Image: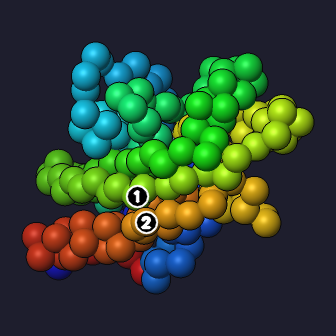
Amino acid sequence: MIRLPFILASASPRRRFLIRTFPFRARVVPGRTPERRPMASEPPARYALAMAEQKANEVARRVGRGLVLGADTIVHLGGTIFGKPTSKAAARRMLAALAGRWHEVHTGLCLVAVPGRRAWRATARTRVRLKDFSKPELDRLARRNHDKAGAYAAQARGNPFVAEYRGDYDNVVGLPRKTLQILLKKAAKAGFRPKV
């Protein structure tokens, strides 16, 4: 069994918080590659997984040794993929489109072992319905959440966003821990475990 340092290829404070619940230490090394726009009719799960792989592989090339986790979360509604908004105005448009409606949150995970470049991949999907927002609420929430996929943060105190959901709530926050456990078990079967 090879014990490797666990490396989270993400700057997300929500992912850092959730990864601390695992029984190993995680080092944070954010990716440097810009996210590409989704291609026309690209399935949302495939896009999220491609972005997770890109992040994991870019960080894996830099660190040289470790179990590197790349993750990417997107919001999908009616054929449109919502990533991180580019401005507060874009965040407001996203929230207005999503308010009161059922949509899907997809997270792609890619765990890469280096050296060796073995990789394990998975996606998680959760259906979510946001609350309806007044115009002042939309303005306030857009100002606070213009750096998050779909322009909302499910773990926010008092949860001003989510009315109901079906599936893994951790996925909505940005790191589906049950899905990550499956990847870690696959890595362990191949002889790789995180250092504790």
Quadrant housing residue 17? bottom right
Q: Where is residue 171 shown, x and y percent of the image?
A: 45, 60
Q: How is the image coloured?
A: rainbow
Can you tell which mark lies on residue 3? none
Q: Amino acid at mark 2?
A: Arg
The image quadrant where one finds the N terminus is: bottom left
Q: CA distance from mark 2 to mark 1?
A: 6 Å
Q: Quick check: can you spot residue 138?
A: yes
Q: Earlier in the sequence, mark 2 or mark 1?
A: 1
Between 55 and 46, the one lying in front of the other is 46
Q: For the point 76% across and 43% down, which residue is it?
A: 133
Q: Secondary structure at mark 1?
A: strand
Q: For the point 50% across and 63% down, which residue is it?
A: 165
Between 167 and 15, the one lying in front of the other is 167
Q: Quick check: can you spot residue 194?
A: no
Can you tell which mark lies on residue 126? 1
Contact, CB < 8 Å: mark 2 with mark 1? yes
Q: Amino acid at mark 1?
A: Thr
Left or right: 155 as drawn, with respect to 196: right
Q: Where is residue 142 shown, x and y percent of the image?
A: 76, 34
Q: Pointer 2: what residue?
A: 166
Quadrant housing residue 85? top right
Q: Residue furthest right?
A: 136
Left or right: 124 as drawn, with respect to 84: left
Give the crowd class for mark 1: few <14, some 14-19, many >=20 residues within 10 Å.
Answer: some
